[in-house]
Amino acid sequence: MTLVDDLRSFNRFYTREIGLLNRRLPGGELSLAEARVLYEIAQAPAPAPGRTAADVGRTLRMDKAHLSRIVARFRTRGLIESRISPDHGKHRMLSLTDAGRKVFAGLEAGARHEIGDLLAPIDPAGRARLARAMDEMRAVLERSQTPPPGWRLRPLAPGDVGWIAHRQARIYHEEFGWDWTYEGLACQILGAFVLGFDAAREDAWVAERNGSIVGAIFLIGGCEFFRSLNSLYYMG
């Protein structure tokens, strides 16, 4: 299978799992596209008077004609209202009416309940894996250069050194073809660092994302250390 096939297969699986194949979303009588438009209108930051249809269209990358029909249906149902922007006389700002806020609240409650049921049988470790996987997919697809929320740099903790030796052995095998005996060298160097640790001249830190280790950096006095432990190294 190609990556295109893999992504299409995942999309079919995911849309089925979260119920997007249903004609209407839980908690309301709106289609997925209508619910997304309503959500974006509801997200106008206070005290802004609303969002323009153009703003919503750019955010959702939605066809203008399709968006225009949805906005017209919302007006007919009394879910939204519009007013002239105080900053630009040609801009009409869309915002929810009381009826619109009621529909939106029902959609939010229904969606949260449905996703909550989906996540309920997953243990904490599985949830952490899911969060990391979603971060990875979003970062790759958005081509984002900004680290997502959840990054931190912390001191070493029990178990870190052994894990780092394991990852170093795996990385050097995958990237350079080195065999399992390289792990002995990694353990020897890391063990020497631990046994002879000099807090006045040395230190080490671990990089985490959403609670999982993704890299490490070692500052070692009086010796040359191999390249991957001498700088922050991605281990995902």
Image (cartoon, helix red, strand yellow):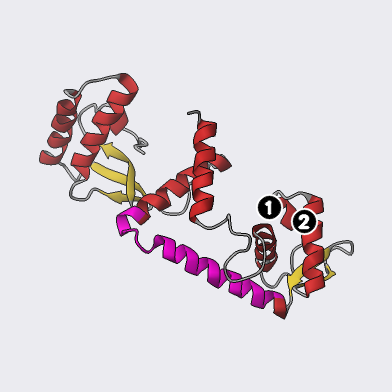
Give how far apart the Cα atoms at labels 2 and 1 are.
10 Å
The x, y position of residue 163, in whole percent, is 22, 41
Q: Label 2, on which residue?
A: 67
Give the residue type at disc 2: Leu
The residue closer to the viewer here, 225 or 62, is 62
Say which amino acid is labelled 1.
Answer: Leu
The residue lying at 33 percent from left, 53 percent from top is 126
The image quadrant where one finds the C terminus is: top left
Residue furthest to the left: 195
Instruction: Determine the image quadrant of residue 165.
Output: top left
Residue visible at 24% across and 43% down in the picture: 203
Task: Verify whether residue 105 appears in magenta.
Answer: yes
Q: Is residue 146 visible to us here?
A: no
Q: Which residues are magenta?
A: 100-126
Does residue 114 lie above or below 103 as drawn?
A: above
Q: Residue at x 26, y 26 (%)?
A: 226
Expressed as whole percent of the image width and height from the top left, the position of residue 130 reads 40, 51
Secondary structure of residue under mark 2: helix
Closer to us: mark 2 or mark 1?
Answer: 2
Q: Is residue 171 above or below residue 14?
A: above
Q: Position of residue 219 (x, y in %)?
A: 27, 37
Mark linked to residue 60: 1
Q: Earlier in the sequence, mark 2 or mark 1?
A: 1
Magenta stretch: dominant secondary structure: helix
Q: How many numbered circles are shown?
A: 2
Extreme residue in the bottom direction: 98
Is residue 153 or residue 102 the one in the foreground?
102
Residue 142 is a magenta residue = no
Compared across the picture, whether 59 is left or right of 231 comes to right
Other-residue count near label 1 (Cα within 10 Å), few / some / many at <14 / 14–19 / ≥20: some
Left or right, 38 with respect to 205, comes to: right
Q: Could you say which disc has been placed on residue 220 in the image? A: none
